[in-house]
Image (cartoon, rainbow, N blue to C red):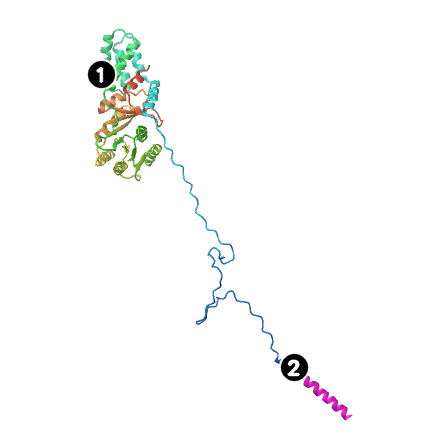
Amino acid sequence: MDILILAVVIAVVVLGALAGLVVGSRRKKQLPPPPPAAPDITAPPAEPHVGDEAETPRDEPRRTIEEVDLPGGGAPTAVEEPPVVEELPPVEIEVPEPTAGRLIRLRARLSRSQNALGKGLLTLLSREHLDEDTWEEIEDTLLTADVGVQPTQELVEGLRERVKVLGTRTPEELRGLLREELLKLVGTDMDRTVRTEPETSKPGIVMVVGVNGTGKTTTTGKLARVLVADGRSVVLGAADTFRAAAADQLQTWGERVGAYTVRGPEGGDPASVAFDAVKEGKEMGSDVVLIDTAGRLHTKTGLMDELGKVKRVVEKHAPLDEVLLVLDATTGQNGLVQARVFAEVVEITGIVLTKLDGTAKGGIVVAVQRELGVPVKLVGLGEGADDLAPFEPEAFVDALIGE
């Protein structure tokens, strides 16, 4: 019995010892390391410490900046190209109609105009008895046509003498008689050439003056077309600085025929613009410089003095070859008043009559020539670009008396 108890005790001790060994071995066994923590993307990258060696570069080809993705993983943003500016087509240069061709057309147009002056005179002269009352009517007809008092008296006296000698008067004889007397008044021996070729050196300098509304700026542009048609190179001076529209209009005329326009700021000094235009014309070797001046009312003394200043400043470069006065043929005697005032400020060398077609005031040609002692050189017979032509006394008189 004692032996059995002893055996049980020994067995228990052995089992206890074995259990202690197992537990001890388990306590000595290391646990596996914990998994690494996720990196904090908000924390700044670790910087190398002093003494750390740089990482050995990788043997990979370098990438260009275009191949490197920007933050965000998106595709590289395309650089916006500047917009393509379309080139405007060049301004088409017009070829003006030659002077000879337009003369034929204008002569026909003037002849077709129903002018009361010539018809009225022929009707009165065709009466069987030319008494004093008839001659007074003839005088009234001439005065109404703005021929002027002195020229009217000369014409009536010449007609009375010729009719008395002639005796019998057929329509053809009367027309021939009236034509001869009118040609005497208009004048066939006056030099009507527009002087644009100086004898010493070019360019020729032409100044255009006149009251606003007479077609002064338009006439300057049309004259440029006449000169270009004759093979001349032209520079335009927009010295009418008080009207921006005048400078724009003149530049448009110039661009159409390839003429260069010199202009200044609105309200600037007209004399300065005129001076620059002549200077530019010399540097460019142009044949002619046309200067369009301000056309203020002739009653404003200060502005008329300014016109005189433009003339003096231009003549510092070279003398003026022409000073053309533009008059509206429909203004009649008021045009004579304008002519007198402008003649006092600048020396007028020629007259341009606009709106001459179909008017009963054609006698202004005689009156203004007699008033200023200078010839009508150019006439405008319409609104077209080429409706400006040299004045022809014979064609004008033939148009007055009709066919």
Give whichever of discs 2 and 1 has the lower sequence position.
2
Question: To which residue does mark 2 refer?
Answer: 23
Which span is picked out in magenta? Answer: 1-19
Query: Residue 304 in magenta?
Result: no
> Predominant secondary structure in magenta?
helix
Say which amino acid is labelled 2. Answer: Val
Residue plotted at (25% across, 26% down): 350
Quarter holding residue 49: bottom left
In the picture, the disc for residue 154 is 1
Disc 1 residue type?
Glu
Q: Is residue 16 magenta?
A: yes
- Give residue 235's quadrant in the image: top left
Q: Residue at x 24, y 17 (%)?
A: 184
Q: Residue at x 25, y 17 (%)?
A: 183
Quadrant holding the N terminus? bottom right
Which quadrant of the figure contains the C terminus?
Answer: top left
The image shows residue 249 at horizontal and vertical percentages of 34, 33
